[in-house]
Image (cartoon, helix red, strand yellow):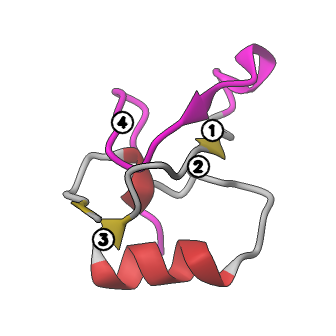
Amino acid sequence: MSDIHDGQCGLCTHFGEGHSDDKLVSIRSSHKAPESLVETCGHPQLVPLHLLVTPISGCNGFQAAA
């Protein structure tokens, strides 16, 4: 398991956007995620790229999940 910090994809509202999944809730509450996890990025400027990111990835478009 990797520790997830503010500014990383695992805590971003766009990480796995469009999926309502208990795994995403768990990551956001525990700040831990498996190293092998890959999810879509739903950031409006990046959607056309169909990016797949890990919870420890990051970009300047980070928006903290509620």
Start and end of the magenta stretch? 44-66
Q: Secondary structure at mark 3?
A: strand
Residue beneath disc 3: 32
Cα gap from disc 1 to disc 4, whole angstroms:
10 Å
Give the mark nearest the N terminus, 3 or 2.
2
Q: Kindly identify the amino acid type of the residue bearing the numbered disc 1.
A: Cys
* In contact (CB < 8 Å): disc 1 and disc 4: no
**Above or below, comparing residue 52 to residue 56 in the picture:** above
Residue beneath disc 4: 57
Nearer the observer, disc 4 or disc 2? 4
Q: Nearer the viewer, residue 11 or 22?
A: 22
Q: Quadrant of the N terminus?
A: bottom left
Disc 2: CA contacts within 10 A as few (<14), some (14-19) or many (>=20):
many
Identify the image quadrant of residue 12: bottom left
Q: Secondary structure at mark 4?
A: loop
* In contact (CB < 8 Å): disc 4 and disc 2: no
Cα gap from disc 3 to disc 2, whole angstroms:
17 Å
**What is the number of the mark on residue 14?**
2
